[in-house]
Image: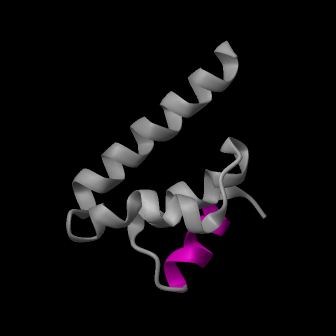
């Protein structure tokens, strides 16, 4: 399953937008689904801000991973 399909599946399970996207990438960063969902819980009421922040956070984690 690709990341987009996984994010959609998570959204349909009840995660908010930013949680769905971040949790879909959690394994890439060595995080559990629960840990990733908690990280994005704050943005439940701020969907646009949360989506932009999540995209930036994913990019940052990939850059950190490349530099390690």
Residue 42: name its quadrant: bottom left
Extreme residue toward the bottom, this view: 13
Total labels drawn = 0
Q: Which residues are magenta?
A: 4-12
Q: Is residue 41 above or below residue 49?
A: below
Residue 1: quadrant of the picture: bottom right
Q: Position of residue 20 (x, y in %)?
A: 51, 66
Identity of the residue furthest to the top in this view:
67
Magenta part, dominant SS? helix
Q: Residue at x 71, y 46 (%)?
A: 30
Along the line of sight, the residue nearer the viewer: 26 or 51 = 26
Residue 33's x, y, as percent? 63, 65
Residue at point 35%, 53% (across, down): 51
* Residue occupying the point 63% across, 51% down: 25
Q: Is residue 30 above or below residue 56?
A: below
Foreground: 21 or 33? 33
Q: Quadrant of the C terminus?
A: top right
Q: Is residue 10 magenta?
A: yes
From the viewer's perspective, tell me whether residue 55 is left or right of residue 46.
right
| Magenta-span inclusion, residue 56 | no
The correct choice, above or below, for 60 with respect to 38 in the image is above
């Amino acid at each position: 399953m690709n990341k987009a399909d996984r994010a959609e599946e998570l959204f349909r399970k009840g995660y908010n937008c930013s949680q769905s996207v971040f949790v879909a990438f959690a394994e890439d960063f060595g995080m559990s689904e629960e840990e990733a969902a908690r990280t994005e819980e704050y943005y439940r009421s701020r969907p646009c801000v949360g989506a932009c922040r999540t995209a930036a956070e994913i990019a940052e984690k990939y850059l950190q991973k490349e530099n390690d």
